[in-house]
Image (cartoon, helix red, strand yellow):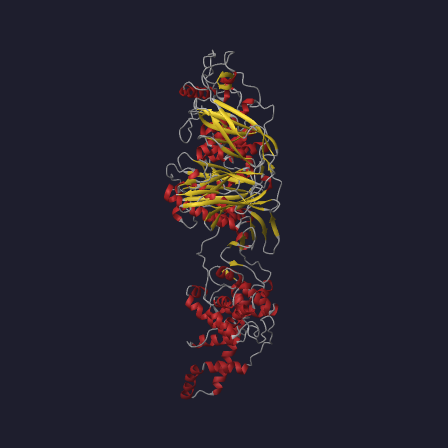
């Protein structure tokens, strides 16, 4: 229903009536009528003292002349320094700068000085909003010439005669405009005269509509809101274009006494309803709509409400102020479109708050921060500088994303990236043993987090498990200056004073900003290409002119592509880190590969997690702003990784799955030592029973080839200044060699006699009579034709010595193992092409001896639909609720033909969705099942959609939850 009555009502712009001039006699009679009581007393005195009318007339003429002369002088004096009304429109008007999200749909904040103003055109203001203001403030606006002479005369007469009953001089809209836009708000006759003079001039210069437009953009509406648009946005969260009738009347009520009405809603409601009644009485709206509007509750927002993205807003304001100056930012009416993703920011704020609150209770860490970026553009998508901006107890207004903090092991990827560029590889082997590192000041002896020694490890194992000792060795091999050069190219700005950094740099011995650290990881996510991080997409001035506009660049390659791919291959390898973090850790996502790294400072002050997919990079810091220690053991994987995981999972929900590009194979001419080969290795043929060197007396079936290792640290084989070059002629020339080598030899002594000890005795055939394990394939038979995609395999094993494990191979690829008798299994042939294939079994005995058997079979089964196998759990497996979360593991077949797999949990008739995977898929996939259901039996089912649009029911298994 329209809020207007059915009568034809003209808008303020169309209402034009000629101004009616008051007749002098009527003018004087109204004054005399108003002041009747005041004049009675003088006439009585005249009668008593016999004063003649002639004397009265002379006196009045004299007083009138004197008054006119005085008024003329006052007007002349008041007019001498009046501002030029012709420049009213051209003058600079203070306007608020508005900061928006990346869509331009959400206003994040308005920046302003002492006045918050947003201009609006008169035609955009609803007619009932215009009339509400006109009727309550100046109902004769379209009739007078700018000044309400009757009101002014009444006020002067009242004040002159000392009457307390006379009405004050109400200002017209024109006069109110002058008071707010040109003159001050002082109360004096001189200011009133100036106001009247300017009002007359303005009325001659501008049309009524122009004056009304200026009025609606100038008048104060309370607090720092100037103009109806700023007031509407502030109080109702909407443009004045969209206000309801009740809201329009509320806005019209405010200019008379903004503070009084804003602080007393009952009083405000009375005045609002009075204005609605005026609209009805003057036929501007129907009575019915007026009554409806009066029933609408007053809902005014106040500035005390929580800011959205406060740290990001202040970061943007700082950038703007540095470039354009504070005055332009606060009064220039700029429109800023930022890179912020409104939805991701909401998720980030929720997860930081929830995670920090948990950390405070459990780990004595009361704060957290998060930054998310798009690695393909460098754009900041989310920034949370603290869990609660308004919480002074945790220094919530400090933006931790911009504060330098020690990163712990989260800095290690930069070290390994530099090492890979120099020639090391994920398969290069280093010794994780207690080592003394010589420095210019004092010896440096790092330890792994658990104080253990693990002997020889690959760089893949070292980085994935965040081992400290191999990391320090890698830093030395890569070179501190090379690493700092790389960090500078990646955009880190807090590492300029190189004299401060030594071998502890790799363990987080420097301070970096979360914002820059996340940006550094965007370089890794983008395969070494660096896009400078950006926070602003576009800046327009108050006239709509574009001052700045973000444009996509080609970026700059700052790390070799293969070096980054090898690094990412490690950081996304959950199996490689499982020996430290377990398979079910928060550094994985259930439906896509992700690369991640944690960090913790030695004194438990800072916990970090940074990780990425090809399209999203997120970093989280957790700790205390005052640098107070967290609880002992509060690792980054405990305090930061859960926040990171929850944000990433929600942010990427229903987004296409993206995979990392695998690194190229090593070149054929690569030095063996760089891929973990040739480190003192000796390959010998030995008797597998007694370990002695094989001779002619050794039976052929007892001979096996073993690799033996003579331990030396890597500096024995590599020159750190020429890693790709020849071995060092004198390894001891390296200042670190002696201490590194001593560490390795000390560790080797502690291990005692081991498999690494090269045998010196020769076999004399004495073990030839020892019984060997026996294993035979019963089903299938050699060259058997198989017409299904499942192959039951039955075996028989000997008991002297007893077989303890049987491994099954298809075409030399390990498929499965059975550890309990009778060791039979069923093999699934989903990926095999039709034709002949080889089945091999290997039985292992407890004494280390093995036996093998193999045969060929002919597969003629037709190709089947794409499917998968449940690797974990197996059907009928049981779990206790305390074991959750658990990681489901599947192996897909004909993966390139799978478009989507939906996993569901069935409980009788009830079905719950667990996860949804969208192709392209990896062959082996992990799915996190976080929350345990109630105790009972369940079916884990699936539905498969192929790339050609067909739907199939996938494999099902039954499990029990206790």
Q: Does residue 675 sit above or below 189 in this rendering?
A: above
**Residue 594 in sight:** no
**x and y, in percent, of residue 478 in the image:** 52, 27
Total labels drawn: 0
Along the line of sight, the residue nearer the viewer: 378 or 885: 885
Q: Quadrant of the N terminus?
A: bottom right
Is residue 746 shown left or right of residue 146? Answer: left
**Residue 947 in sight:** yes
**x and y, in percent, of residue 35 in the image:** 45, 81
Q: Does residue 617 sit above or below 202 in this rendering?
A: above
Q: Quadrant of the C terminus?
A: top left
**x and y, in percent, of residue 351 in the image:** 45, 47
Q: Does residue 481 sit above or below 906 in this rendering?
A: above
**x and y, in percent, of residue 727 in the image:** 55, 19
Along the line of sight, the residue nearer the viewer: 653 or 139: 653
Along the line of sight, the residue nearer the viewer: 692 or 121: 692
Residue 839 location, quadrant: top right
Residue 729 location, quadrant: top right
């Amino acid at each position: 229903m329209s809020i207007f009555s059915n009568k034809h009502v003209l808008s303020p712009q169309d209402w034009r009536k000629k101004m009616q001039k008051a007749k002098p006699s009527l003018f004087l009679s109204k004054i005399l009528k108003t002041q009747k009581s005041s004049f009675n007393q003088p006439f009585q005195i005249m009668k008593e003292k016999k004063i003649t009318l002639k004397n009265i007339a002379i006196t009045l003429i004299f007083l009138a002349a004197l008054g006119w002369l005085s008024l003329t002088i006052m007007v002349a004096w008041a007019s001498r320094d009046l501002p030029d009304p012709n420049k009213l429109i051209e003058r600079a008007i203070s306007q608020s700068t508005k900061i928006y999200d990346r869509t331009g749909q959400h206003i994040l904040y308005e920046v302003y000085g002492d006045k918050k103003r947003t201009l609006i055109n008169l035609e955009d203001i609803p007619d009932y909003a215009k009339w509400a203001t006109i009727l309550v403030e100046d109902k004769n606006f379209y009739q007078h010439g700018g000044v309400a002479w009757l009101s002014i005369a009444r006020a002067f007469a009242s004040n002159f005669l000392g009457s307390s009953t006379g009405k004050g001089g109400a200002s017209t809209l024109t006069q109110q405009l002058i008071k707010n836009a040109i003159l001050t708000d002082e109360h004096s006759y001189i200011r009133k005269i100036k106001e009247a003079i300017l009002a007359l001039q303005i009325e001659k210069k501008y049309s009524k509509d122009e004056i009304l437009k200026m009025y609606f953009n100038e008048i104060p509406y309370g607090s720092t809101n100037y103009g109806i648009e700023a007031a509407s946005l502030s109080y109702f969260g909407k443009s004045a274009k969209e206000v309801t009738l009740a809201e329009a009347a509320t806005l019209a009520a405010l200019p008379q006494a903004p503070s009084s009405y804003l602080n007393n809603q009952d009083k405000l409601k009375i005045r609002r309803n009075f204005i609605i009644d005026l609209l009805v009485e003057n036929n501007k709206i129907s009575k019915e709509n007026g009554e409806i509007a009066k029933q609408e509750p007053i809902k005014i927002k106040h500035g005390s409400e929580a800011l959205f993205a406060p740290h990001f807003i202040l970061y943007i304001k700082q950038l703007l102020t540095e470039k354009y100056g504070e005055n332009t930012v606060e009064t220039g009416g700029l429109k800023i479109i930022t890179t912020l993703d409104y939805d991701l920011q909401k998720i980030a704020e929720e997860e930081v708050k929830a995670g920090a609150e948990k950390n405070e209770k459990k780990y004595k860490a009361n704060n957290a921060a998060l930054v998310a970026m798009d690695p393909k553009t460098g754009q900041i998508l989310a920034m949370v500088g603290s869990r609660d901006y308004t919480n002074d107890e945790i220094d919530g207004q400090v933006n931790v994303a911009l504060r330098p903090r020690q990163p712990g092991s989260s800095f290690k990827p930069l070290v390994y990236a530099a090492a890979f560029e120099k020639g090391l590889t994920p398969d290069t082997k280093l010794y994780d043993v207690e080592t003394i590192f010589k420095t210019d000041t004092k010896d440096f002896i790092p330890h792994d987090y658990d104080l253990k020694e693990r002997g020889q490890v690959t760089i893949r194992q070292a980085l994935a498990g965040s081992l400290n000792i191999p990391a320090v060795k890698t830093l030395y091999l890569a070179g501190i200056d090379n690493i700092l050069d790389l960090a500078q190219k990646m955009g880190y700005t807090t590492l300029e004073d190189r004299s401060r950094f030594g071998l502890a740099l790799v363990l987080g011995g420097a301070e970096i900003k979360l914002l820059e650290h996340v940006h550094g990881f965007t370089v890794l996510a983008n395969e070494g290409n660096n896009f400078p991080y950006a926070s602003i997409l576009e800046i327009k001035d108050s006239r709509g002119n574009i001052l700045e506009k973000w444009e996509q660049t080609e970026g700059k390659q700052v790390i070799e592509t293969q070096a980054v791919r090898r690094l990412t291959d490690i950081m996304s390898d959950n199996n490689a880190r499982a020996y430290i973090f377990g398979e079910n850790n928060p550094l994985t996502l259930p439906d896509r590969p992700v690369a991640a790294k944690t960090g913790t400072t030695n004194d438990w002050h800072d916990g970090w997690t940074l990780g990425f997919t090809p399209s999203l990079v997120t970093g989280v810091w957790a700790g205390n702003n005052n640098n107070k220690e967290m609880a002992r053991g509060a690792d980054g994987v405990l305090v930061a990784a859960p926040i990171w995981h929850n944000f990433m999972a929600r942010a990427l929900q229903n987004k296409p799955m993206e995979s990392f590009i695998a690194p190229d194979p090593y070149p054929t001419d690569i030095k063996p030592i760089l891929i973990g080969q040739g480190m003192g290795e000796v390959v010998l043929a030995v008797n597998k029973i007694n370990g002695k060197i094989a001779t002619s007396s050794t039976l052929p079936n007892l001979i096996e080839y073993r690799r033996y290792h003579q331990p030396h640290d890597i500096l024995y084989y590599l020159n750190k200044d020429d890693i790709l070059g020849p071995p060092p002629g004198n390894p001891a020339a390296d200042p670190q060699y002696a201490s590194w080598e001593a560490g390795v030899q000390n560790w080797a002594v502690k291990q005692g006699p081991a498999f690494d000890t090269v045998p010196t005795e020769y076999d004399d055939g004495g073990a030839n009579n020892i019984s060997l394990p026996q294993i035979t394939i019963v089903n299938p038979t050699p060259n058997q034709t198989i017409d299904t995609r499942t192959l039951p395999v039955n075996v028989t094993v000997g008991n002297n010595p007893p077989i303890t494990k049987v491994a099954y191979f298809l075409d030399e690829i390990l498929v499965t193992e059975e550890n309990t008798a009778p060791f039979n299994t069923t093999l699934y042939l989903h990926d095999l092409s039709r034709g002949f294939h080889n089945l091999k079994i290997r039985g292992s005995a407890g004494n280390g001896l093995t036996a093998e058997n193999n045969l060929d079979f002919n597969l003629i089964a037709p190709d089947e639909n794409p499917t998968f196998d449940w690797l974990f759990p197996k059907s009928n497996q049981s779990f206790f609720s305390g074991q959750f979360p658990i990681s489901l593991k599947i192996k897909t077949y004909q993966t390139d033909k799978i478009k989507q797999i939906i996993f569901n949990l069935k409980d009788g008739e009830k079905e719950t969705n667990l996860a949804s995977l969208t192709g392209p898929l990896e062959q082996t996939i992990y799915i996190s099942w976080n929350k345990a259901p109630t105790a009972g039996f369940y079916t884990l089912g699936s539905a498969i959609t192929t790339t050609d649009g067909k739907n199939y029911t996938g494999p099902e298994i039954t499990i029990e939850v206790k």
